[in-house]
Amino acid sequence: MAQHVVVLGGGATGEAFVGTLRRLDKNVRITLVEDELVGGECSYWACIPSKTLLRPLEIAFRARLAPGVTAKVDPVQIFKWRDEVSEKDDTSQVEWVQKLDAEVVRGRARIVSPGEVEVDGRKVEYDELMISTGSVPAMPHVEGLDEVAAWTSREGTSAEAVPESLLIIGAGAVGCELAQFYARASSKVTLVQSGDFILPRIDREAGDLLAGLFEEEGIDIRLNARAKSVERVNGSLRLELADDELEASTLLVATGRLPNVEGLGLEQLDVSVGKTGIEVDDRLCAGEHVWAAGDVTGVALFTHVGKYQARVAAANVAGRDRRADYRALPSAVFTDPQVAAVGDTSGEGAVVGKWDLTKVSRTATFQKPKRPGFVKLFADPKRGVLVGAVLVGPEAGEWMGQLTLAIRAEVPVGVLLDTIQPFPSFSEAIFFATRELDL
């Protein structure tokens, strides 16, 4: 059994690892090393502040779809609430770690040899090493980008005022969420996407549906558009595309993230770093006495996946034998409507069943006029089980849980058809979509 475990990175993944390991092993010595804030990107610059920002605008917009109700938007109060929820003070997080009888060491860690790391001149020896250093923004090759003080997601979720106009490069989850927030907060938003639909990692029907709603809200979407250069001219930013020029007061880059591995000294260890991150096996082992979890592995850059991997790794460090299973990886984009997906949605070899959300009674009681949405299911015709699902609708990330479980547990489609869904609810669409599967 390990005597001393050192954890590099105190974000959500590192915290989950520490918490799980302590529950499984009451005596092991644990040291958590963090060079910024314990709680990490998710707590202070990503998931928590962005979802806090989005919620008031969602309420205000839905008030316009509810007869007899009005709502006023006050960006100052919205930013104030965000600061209350994601205050950049990690005192409570540090105290939580310390209550687990784990030491918190501040500073940037560097591996100097197998079994030893250095943190700002302090040498720390370990038996087992967990690397959970997360990821950093990936910046595209755009001429002049380094000179114009472009926003990344950090600045986008930390702003104190709404820019008059905003250009966003990248229409993935971050780009879409912030595009809708700032557009609803009165900014003139242009969304630039290199591909031919937004949310390219999710089913195209979902991206096209959301794009139509975005355009109704005044968001200018440029597809198949690649940014070539950017410069600041008379106080404005001018972005040059292949066949057009765009101007705005602010530029936000949301073109993905890269594993945070630079300067860690990984060359001192027998680990492999690929294009997407540190390579690990299904036990989250990266090498002899070395483990990795979260964004740094590149498996799936979601906080919940990092936490899951952390629990698997901690169990193995504690002497158990646990393997990661990624068949039912859920994701949710917190636009309005939400876009949720889980499992294999490629459609390859699958039977597909789809149901329009406007056909369930809950939609009529929720908003007027009805807004589009759907449930789309993918099933293996040989085994008679679901392999994937895509949902577009209000709070879709909340009511997709039963589909995640169904895919993970390989629940027979017949059982799903015999499952009683509450009425009136959006989840009733799951029954109808399941009924549409030609099995």
Image (tube, rainbow, N blue to C red):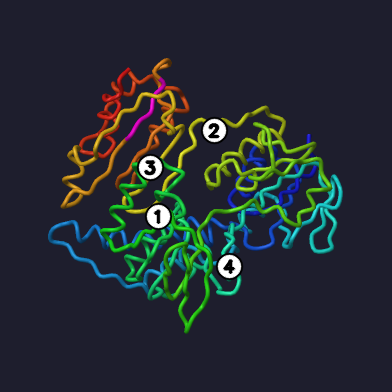
**What x and y, as percent, mark residue 28?**
75, 42
Judged from the image, the secondary structure of the residue bearing numbered disc 2 is loop
* In front: label 3 or label 4: 4
**What x and y, as percent, mark residue 11?**
61, 53
Residue identified by numbered label 4: 143
Would you say residue 84 sits in the magenta stretch? no
Of 146 and 241, nearer the camera is 241
Q: Which of marks 3 and 1 precedes in the sequence? A: 3
Most extreme residue toward the bottom is: 234
Q: Which of marks 4 and 1 precedes in the sequence? A: 4
**What x and y, as percent, mark residue 399?**
35, 39
The span shown in magenta is: 376-380
Residue 284 vertical position relative to residue 239 in the rendered view, above or below: above
What is the three-letter code of the residue carrying label 2?
Answer: Tyr
Of 19 and 126, nearer the camera is 126
Q: Residues within 10 Å of mark 1 (few under 14, many from 20)?
A: some
Q: Is residue 37 left or right of residue 382?
A: right
Residue depicted at x 25% and y 29%: 432
Q: Which of marks 4 and 3 precedes in the sequence? A: 4
- Report the number of discs: 4
Cα distance between the residues tagged 3 and 2:
22 Å
Cα distance between the residues tagged 1 and 3:
13 Å
Residue 347 vertical position relative to residue 339 in the rendered view, above or below: above
Residue identified by numbered label 3: 204
Residue identified by numbered label 2: 326
Q: Residues within 10 Å of mark 3 (few under 14, many from 20)?
A: some
